Amino acid sequence: MSNLNDRNIIITGASGGIGRASALLFAKAGARVVLLDRDVPGIEETAGLVTGGGGKAYLIPCDITDEDAVSHAVNDVVKQFGRLHGAFNNAGVEHTNLPLHELSAAAWDRVLKIDLTGVFYCMKHQIRAMLESGGGSIVNTASALGTVAISAASDYVAAKHGVIGITKGAAVDYGTQNIRVNAIMPGIVETPMVARVSAEPHFAKQYQALRERHPIGRFGKPEEIAKAAIWLLSDDSSFVTGTALAVDGGYLSI
């Protein structure tokens, strides 16, 4: 497993799913994990699991759609621990599950604000902190739907395409300043978010077809995404930046 010894790593969306699995794996690899989420009981539970396993966790309640809150969170990490070494910007919400012409402006704004603008706020302040301390590594959770689409998901598809775009843009901007920026494109992963979406009638009709779309024959597990993230955050991927890594069970191969 890749080494994150003595590194301070922010994880957004750390209350469950991929974020929680990543917190446990990163801590096992030696990192101090800084858990950000607006779900306070959720990150408290994650922190308990991390410390119960002998790891180091620090939690910061934070709504990533509030730029001031994000700025304060990053500043807190630097004040408490000296510097920020890495970040896994993983927080997100599912699509509204409506065709584009039925989407309200409010629904569109909600998904884009969390899934794309929130990533921008996080990257902006994480990069600022990294520039002041010699560099770092950032990983953003995009999606296989950052390059393709499914029906009734224009809001989510647009946001995740944007995450890949901002990842590549930042990689170009900061590559010579020792800051690497990459994205992960999961296929469908067994998380609470997917469980919520799969209960919707429209998605339920697609559920079996989507499973069959994964040549590996199943959906992913949160730990499998976390393993890709830890590699991208570590020095093992020192020549990798600006990439969108598919961890999708072959979804994009069909």
Image (tube, helix red, strand yellow):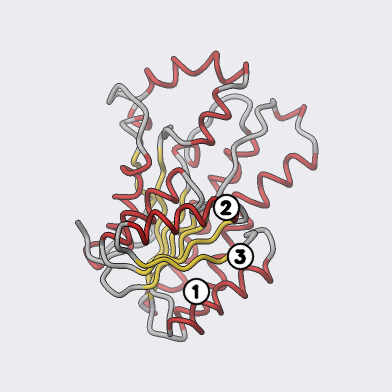
Near-viewer residue (126 or 196): 196
The residue that label 1 is drawn on is 127
Q: Earlier in the sequence, mark 3 or mark 2?
A: 2
Per the rendering, the mark at residue 121 is 3
Q: Label 3: how many residues lie within 10 Å, few (<14), some (14-19) or many (20+)? A: many
Q: Secondary structure at mark 2?
A: helix
Near-viewer residue (148 or 88): 88
Near-viewer residue (198 or 156): 198
Q: Give the quadrant of the C terminus.
A: top left
Q: Give the quadrant of the N terminus.
A: bottom left
Question: Residue 48: where, in percent of width, then height?
Answer: 43, 57
Question: Residue 243: where, in percent of width, then height?
Answer: 37, 54
Residue located 69% across and 26% down the image: 98
Q: Label 1: how many residues lie within 10 Å, few (<14), some (14-19) or many (20+)? A: many
Q: CA distance from mark 2 to mark 1?
A: 28 Å
* Three-letter amino acid code at the position of disc 3: Tyr
Q: Earlier in the sequence, mark 2 or mark 1?
A: 2
Question: Residue 139: where, in percent of width, then height?
Answer: 41, 59
Residue located 31% across and 42% down the image: 224
